[in-house]
Image: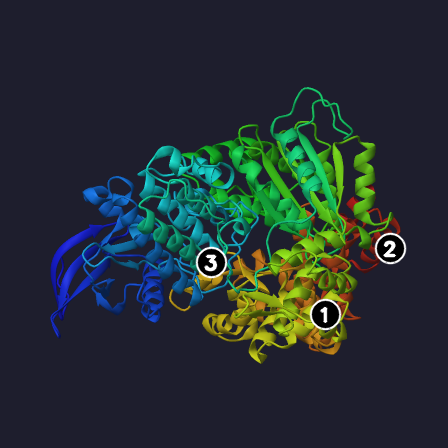
């Protein structure tokens, strides 16, 4: 018990994992209230922020089916939420204590009115654009005296129309694991929307009717696998009192794919009312049958998330994973697979927007079944000079995943990796900084010659990959956009694939085959791998067929394929079946009010002639640029700056270059997030402005490369250099440690605007930074990027630099000569060596270039 001014605390009525719930009296009007307080005496800032969010959402929802929130009071170091007390208990408590809830919620006459009320309340919540995300018996409160139902606990609810979740450790998932929807696991290749609540409601109904959960396991990963892949026993087979029609309703709610569920809580309510009406009239539902969801029309413009026309490609991808996860002694099929292969490179080739990335994520379910790991990274079209950028991002993601494992598992991983890398862990930490959080601080790297350094890096990287990909936990490494890869990454790919010691490793590489020729470095690398007879296969992804587009349109608009054929022809004529373009084109038609839902007929309406007369571009980048240009001015400004950073960015970096607070920056971005142009990569954005340093963790990703490209295209060519220079200057004003960590990104921004630099001191500083970037790239055996940085540094020197900037000039020439040698540009290397020999002040200053000549 506790003392709260202006309230009398009477009794504790409930205890959850995170909070204590009391009944009390508000002194000012003697009204009974519920007092909900966090259990911890010193809750974390994150917990307090989520508590505030729960209060704000609950307070704003003035609905009869939601418990009202009156106030949020401060109590020492924590908060107390003051809520409406309508005399109810949670269904979870009632199932355990009340005889009326022991068998099928006291019979159908108890269950059906209750279920109808819950569906109605949930429908009201969804109508206010809130996804609850934690529907379960503990969060549904029922007053048995007046049969009133209310929904509580909006702590993890979302105001966004949909959320795209990433591949997470099951122990880190939001919601109550036994009730969450398949898409809430982050392993279904589907976004979370309001229909996720309908799945959780299905699990709740299942438990109320059978007194059992559909899936039970003590292991979190097993529960996740059940949600995404296993079908539960039908309720009527567990409890004979449950009529088949009601069992079918529950199973429809629990469909794995959102398109197969009810599309609205109100559609569910209509079916429950039909059951209730029949039961009250006939006294039973034993032989009662009707087609479900006849009145289930949401009126929302919702494009199905499922993949159309990709069945064969998905099967090919899953077979590749199966071969790696369970390699048989010999393969006998048309694919080229070596007899003992347990490492494979699967390429996915196709135009931008054809659906390569979406296809790859279909492997998540199979990975879950095999207790495997998935890590993804992509090369950036505007950051092509950063060595190993995509591979580094993927393995950073993998390390952050490991950090969420149990202490025992993390210690096991630490020992496994340390055994593999020995005392040379710092070599890998320089490329994968998050690795230090797992294996701890490592000894400084022993300085060796360039050839030895490259061999050491390759050896350590292979040992690291071998350690983290094992039969007990196969690894899928997905690297996207190889057409923008740096030379060091291509070399590393070749090194990994030609190592026969690897096992249980599937590398999936996606690239735009229309943007590479036979002479492209990536294609040359692939040819080398083919000659080395590595296991390499390709999925060629084409545009959707007209038939596929017709299926997508007819399911989006809930109409017969014949009715949608005219619209299909118009859309296909513009998009040629490009999946991304097709979806965005349909969204544009809806936003232009050319696709309208008629509330009278409950059908979608459109006019083919009006759409045909509309002058819409047949270029997807122009289409997206037009959409972006309609956003509020502050959103447009922030989005253009974000496009200059990269495909992914953190809020802290953007707020620095936007020169406003993280909270204000997030407010500027909000319309882009609401419209799906940006996807949050975590939930940290919800805490911005409430918790210090949250902005550093809040990360976002452009919905697609074409969106980033469109935002970037809105910057005039004359402004691009000045913006990049401004970004570089702002990012350079940081601590030495942070500058070292983000050195490549900072230098790339400054280099993009270097022609506008006039001050000699600033040119000198940028030349020094390019020298540092060149050395850092060389240390990771990334000689081509190193050479590029060093050449840029040389170009920034003043004509008399040998007299005025001797040490810097000598260092740049020496490093560039060595980098040129390792890039097989021998003539350039010799030219640079001769300059040093000519300009060096002493014999000692000539030693290093003599060593280069001797190589």
Q: Residue furthest top?
A: 329
Which picture quadrant has residue 802?
bottom right
Instruction: Kindly give the residue lying farthest to the right in the view shown.
Output: 827
In the rendered image, residue 14, in percent from the top left (x then y), is placed at 20, 51
Q: Earlier in the sequence, mark 2 or mark 1?
A: 1
Q: Residue furthest bottom?
A: 633
Which class describes the residues within 10 Å of circle 2: few (<14), some (14-19), or many (20+)?
few
View extreme (front): residue: 282
Above or below: residue 186 compared with residue 367: below
Give the left or right position of residue 152, taking residue 576 as reference: left
Q: Read off the residue under disc 1.
A: 608
| Between marks 2 and 3 in the image, the one whose residue lies nearer the viewer | 3
Q: CA distance from mark 3 to mark 1?
A: 28 Å
**Residue denoted by label 2:** 831
Q: CA distance from mark 2 to mark 3?
A: 72 Å
- The C terminus lies in which quarter of the figure? top right
* Residue pointed to by mark 3: 264
SS class, disc 3: loop
Between discs 2 and 3, the one toward the N terminus: 3
Binning the other alpha carbons within 10 Å of mark 1 as few (below 14), some (14 to 19) or many (20 upward) gives some
The image position of residue 138, as x and y in percent, is 29, 50
- Identify which residue, 277 or 676, lies in the foreground: 277
From the image, which quarter does the N terminus lie in? bottom left
Left or right: 466 with respect to 778?
A: left
Q: Nearer the viewer, mark 2 or mark 1?
A: 1
Residue drawn 27% across the image and 67% down it: 69
User: Mark 1 or mark 3, which is nearer the start of the sequence?
Assistant: 3
Q: Position of residue 85 (x, y in %)?
A: 20, 63
Q: Are marks 2 and 1 in contact (CB under 8 Å)?
A: no
Q: Secondary structure at mark 1?
A: helix
Instruction: Give whichever of 589, 761 is nearer the camera.
Output: 589
């Amino acid at each position: 018990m506790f003392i709260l001014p202006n309230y009398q605390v009477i009794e504790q009525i409930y205890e959850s994992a995170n909070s204590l719930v009391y009944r009390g009296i508000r002194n000012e009007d003697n009204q009974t209230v519920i007092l909900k307080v966090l259990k911890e005496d010193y809750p974390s800032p994150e917990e307090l922020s989520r508590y505030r969010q729960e209060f704000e959402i609950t307070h704003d929802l003035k609905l009869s089916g939601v418990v009202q929130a009156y106030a949020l009071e401060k109590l020492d170091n924590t908060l107390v939420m003051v809520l409406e007390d309508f005399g109810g208990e949670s269904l979870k408590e009632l199932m355990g204590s009340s005889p009326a809830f022991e068998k099928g919620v006291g019979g159908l006459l108890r269950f059906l009115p209750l279920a109808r009320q819950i569906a109605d309340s949930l429908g009201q919540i969804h109508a206010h654009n809130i996804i609850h995300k934690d529907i379960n018996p503990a969060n549904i409160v029922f007053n048995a005296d007046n049969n009133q139902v209310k929904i509580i606990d909006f702590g993890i609810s979302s105001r966004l129309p949909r959320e795209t979740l990433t591949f997470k450790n099951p122990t880190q998932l939001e919601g109550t694991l036994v009730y969450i929807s398949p898409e809430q696991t982050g392993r279904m290749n589907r976004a979370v929307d309001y229909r996720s609540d309908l799945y959780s409601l299905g699990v709740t109904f299942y438990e109320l009717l059978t007194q059992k959960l559909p899936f039970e396991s003590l292991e979190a990963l097993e529960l996740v696998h059940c949600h995404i892949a296993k079908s539960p026993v039908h309720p009527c087979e567990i409890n004979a009192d449950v009529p088949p029609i009601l069992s079918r309703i529950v199973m429809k709610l629990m469909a794995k794919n959102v398109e197969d569920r009810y599309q609205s809580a109100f559609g569910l309510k209509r079916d429950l009312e039909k059951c209730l009406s029949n039961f009250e009239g006939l006294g039973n539902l034993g032989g009662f049958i009707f087609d479900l969801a006849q009145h289930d029309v949401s009126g929302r413009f919702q494009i199905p998330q499922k993949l159309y026309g990709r069945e064969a490609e998905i099967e090919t991808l899953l077979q590749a994973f199966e071969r790696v996860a369970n390699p048989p002694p010999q393969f006998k099929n048309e694919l080229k697979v070596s007899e003992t292969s347990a490492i494979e490179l699967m390429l996915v080739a196709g135009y931008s927007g054809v659906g390569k990335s979406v296809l790859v994520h279909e492997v998540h379910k199979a990975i879950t079944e095999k207790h495997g790991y998935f890590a993804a990274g992509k090369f950036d079209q505007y950051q092509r000079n950063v060595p190993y950028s995509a591979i580094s991002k993927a393995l950073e993601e993998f390390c952050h995943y490991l950090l969420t494992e149990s202490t025992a598992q993390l210690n096991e991983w630490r020992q496994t990796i340390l055994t593999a890398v020995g005392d040379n862990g710092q070599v890998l930490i320089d490329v994968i900084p998050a690795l230090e959080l797992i294996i701890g601080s490592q000894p400084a790297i022993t300085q060796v010659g360039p050839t030895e350094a490259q061999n050491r890096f390759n050896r350590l990287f292979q040992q690291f990959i071998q350690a983290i990909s094992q039969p007990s936990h196969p690894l899928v490494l997905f690297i996207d956009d190889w057409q923008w890869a740096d030379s060091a990454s291509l070399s590393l790919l070749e090194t990994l694939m030609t190592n026969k010691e690897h096992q249980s490793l599937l590398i999936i590489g996606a690239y735009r085959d229309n943007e590479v020729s036979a002479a492209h470095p990536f294609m040359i690398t692939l040819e080398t791998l083919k000659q080395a007879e590595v296991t390499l296969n390709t999925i060629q992804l084409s545009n959707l067929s007209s038939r596929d587009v017709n299926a997508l349109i007819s399911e989006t608009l809930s109409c017969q394929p014949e009715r949608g054929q005219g619209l299909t022809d118009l859309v296909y004529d513009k998009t040629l079946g490009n999946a991304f373009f097709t979806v965005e084109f349909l969204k544009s038609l809806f936003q232009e009010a050319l696709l309208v839902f008629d509330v009278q007929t409950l059908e979608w309406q459109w006019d083919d002639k009006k759409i045909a007369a509309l002058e819409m571009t047949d270029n997807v980048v122009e289409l997206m640029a037009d959409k972006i240009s309609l956003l509020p001015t502050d959103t447009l400004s922030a989005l253009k700056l974000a496009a200059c950073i990269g495909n992914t960015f953190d809020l802290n970096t953007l707020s620095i270059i936007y020169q406003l607070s993280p909270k204000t920056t997030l407010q500027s971005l909000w319309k882009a997030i609401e419209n799906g142009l940006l996807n949050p990569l975590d939930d940290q954005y919800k805490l911005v402005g409430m918790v210090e340093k949250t902005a550093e963790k809040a990360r976002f990703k452009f919905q697609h490369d074409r969106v980033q490209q469109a935002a970037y295209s809105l910057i005039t060519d004359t402004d691009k250099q000045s913006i990049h220079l401004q970004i570089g200057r702002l990012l350079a004003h940081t601590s030495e440690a942070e500058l070292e960590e983000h050195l490549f990104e900072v230098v790339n921004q400054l280099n993009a605007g270097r022609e506008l630099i006039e001050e000699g001191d600033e040119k000198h500083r940028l030349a020094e930074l390019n020298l540092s970037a060149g050395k850092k790239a060389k240390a990771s055996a990334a000689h081509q990027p190193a050479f590029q940085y060093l050449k840029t540094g040389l170009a920034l020197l003043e004509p008399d630099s040998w007299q005025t900037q001797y040490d810097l000039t000598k260092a740049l020439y020496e490093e560039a000569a060595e980098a040129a040698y390792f890039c097989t540009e021998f003539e350039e290397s010799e030219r640079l060596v001769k300059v040093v020999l000519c300009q060096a002040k002493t014999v000692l200053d000539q030693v290093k270039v003599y060593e280069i000549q001797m190589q």
